[in-house]
Amino acid sequence: MRRRKLVCNLILFLGGCTAAVSPIESSSYNSGNSTSNYLKFAVADAMGLENLQRDYEAFRSTLEQVLGIPVRFFPVENRTAATPALQSGQIDIVLAGPSEYVVLKSRAKAVPIVAIQRLNYYPIILVRADSKIKSLVELKGKTIAMRKVGSTSGHLAPTKMLMDAGLDPITDVKILMLGNQGMQALKKGDVDAWTIASDRYKVLLESEGLSEKDFSVIAKGKLLPSDVFVMNSQLEFSVIEDVRSRMLQNHEKLLNSLLMTTVNQPYQGSKFMPANDAEYNIIREVYQKIGLGYFL
């Protein structure tokens, strides 16, 4: 484990703040080979710097104020890129969905610190309003639009729903990973069904100018685990605990900053709470059952 001391530029940064916040009290907060004096923040499913700046700049700025330490973005190229970056000390803190978290925990020994509990976070499977399909069993031989491989609500959880209904997700249905185009594909009739997180469904309907009357929900899944902030295990324990404490104490301010962008509207009504690793065992189970255990 490599540790770096806070240096003068951090003090200068704090001195320039209009509302002084005492810095994290530790001899170190950097890990790996970093020689800079700031925390590096990534979002596991936000690809590229442009998306990070657009969707998380308000949160980054607020987190910087709360922690009293400069926070800079670390863009990732895909959903799995945060894992090696965390292992090598290139990232200090990551916001991850449940599926990304179990991989980060297994491969990079990420430390869960704060969970964002979403009130209405469960998968739904829909068909067109005029479809004759009324149940999951009737999807046998049909085509289903899902989001991305490894997505909690857009792949793993709905796949588990199909399996619980007695369908083999490999031989009984055809699955297309269409990202954010699943709704339009269903509307056009290119697919027979589509799955999405319940809280994101209404946001997407509004953005696409569509109505719930255009679709029919044939199945609802169970409430899914929370999104979670994790930290690099190479950091000192006191630093990790301090960050956890500050984020929980300032949960309303941090949540409000997340809600300033459209993409984060599913966090409406959410709350920050201590993360509980056991909550994610259901995700680990699904990874194993669908033959993706090697991710863990």
Image (cartoon, rainbow, N blue to C red):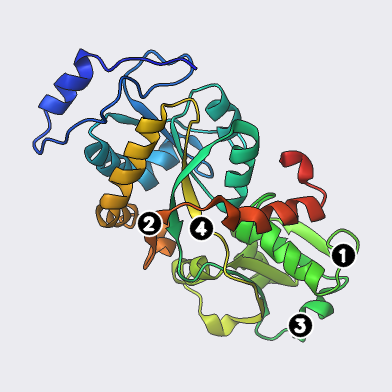
* Numbered circle sitting on residue 272: 2
Is label 1 in a helix, a strand or a loop?
loop
The mark that comes first in sequence, 3 or 4, is 3
Q: Residue furthest front?
A: 238
Contact (Cβ within 8 Å) of mark 2 with mark 3: no
Contact (Cβ within 8 Å) of mark 1 with mark 4: no
When asked about the image quadrant of residue 117, the answer is bottom left
Residue that mark 3 sits on = 135
Q: CA distance from mark 2 to mark 1?
A: 37 Å
Provide residue 279's location: percent of width, then percent of height. 58, 57
Residue at horizontal 77%, vertical 86%?
A: 132
Residue that mark 1 sits on = 168
Is label 4 in a helix, a strand or a loop?
loop
Is label 2 in a helix, a strand or a loop?
strand
Q: CA distance from mark 1 to mark 4?
A: 27 Å
**Residue type, label 4:** Ser
Camera-nearest label, 3 or 4: 4
Say if residue 225 shows up in the picture.
yes
Camera-nearest label, 2 or 1: 2
The mark that comes first in sequence, 4 or 2, is 4
**Residue type, label 1:** Asp
Residue that mark 4 sits on = 226
Residue at horizontal 26%, vertical 37%?
A: 67
Q: CA distance from mark 1 to mark 3?
A: 15 Å
Q: CA distance from mark 3 to mark 4?
A: 27 Å
Provide residue 107's location: percent of width, then percent of height. 65, 33
Is label 3 in a helix, a strand or a loop?
loop
**Residue type, label 3:** Ser
